Image (cartoon, rainbow, N blue to C red):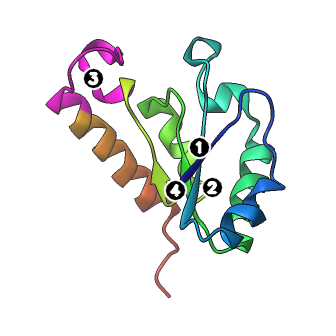
Amino acid sequence: VAVLLADTGIDRTLIPLLARARFIGVMLDTFDKAAGSLPDVVSGAELEAFVRSARADRLAVGLAGSLRTGHIAALMAHDPDILGFRGALCERGARTRTVSPQAVMAVRQAIDLAAAEHRPAAQ
């Protein structure tokens, strides 16, 4: 999986190149964690365009970048294959601390809730 950094803009022209190079997916992340989370750096429209571009080239899509549980529902609306977390899984939300089982469960529950809300209704 290739990782593109969103801090200075998303170069979507790289996505077809990644597909031709036989990458199986592309992850959008942030470099400067102090600048904020991915949703602070990239608009919802830009995220949607990124996901659409990756899907058009049949790549799995990942979103990461200082994500917190509060970001999950909005990001799940873009239907990513992967959400990447580090700090949100750690003690006190600090990415340099050890992983907290309680934080892991909170993130998992938020993902499950958001997935259930975005699941199409049975017909």
- Closer to us: mark 4 or mark 3? 4
Q: Amino acid at mark 4?
A: Val
| Marks 2 and 4, how far apart at CA | 19 Å
| Mark carried by residue 90 | 3
The magenta region covers 88-103
Other residues around mark 1 within 10 Å, as few (<14) / some (14–19) / many (≥20):
few
Q: Amino acid at mark 1?
A: Ala
Residue ID for mark 4:
1
Other residues around mark 2 within 10 Å, as few (<14) / some (14–19) / many (≥20):
some
Q: Earlier in the sequence, mark 3 or mark 2?
A: 2
Q: Earlier in the sequence, mark 1 or mark 4?
A: 4
Q: State the residue at coordinates (60%, 54%).
A: 77
Where residue 87 sits: x, y (%)? 37, 23
**Dots 3 and 2: beta carbons under 8 Å?**
no
Is 62 within the magenta?
no
| Marks 3 and 1, how far apart at CA | 22 Å
Q: Earlier in the sequence, mark 4 or mark 3?
A: 4
Q: Nearer the viewer, residue 118 or 97?
A: 97
Where residue 60 sits: x, y (%)? 55, 65
Secondary structure category for the residue under label 3: loop
Secondary structure category for the residue under label 2: loop
Q: Amino acid at mark 3?
A: Cys
Q: Is residue 82 left or right of residue 47?
A: left
Q: Earlier in the sequence, mark 3 or mark 1?
A: 1
**Dots 3 and 1: beta carbons under 8 Å?**
no
Q: Nearer the viewer, residue 44 or 90?
A: 90
Q: Amino acid at mark 2?
A: His
Residue ID for mark 1:
74
Residue ID for mark 2:
78
Q: State the residue at coordinates (72%, 47%).
A: 47
| Marks 2 and 1, how far apart at CA | 7 Å
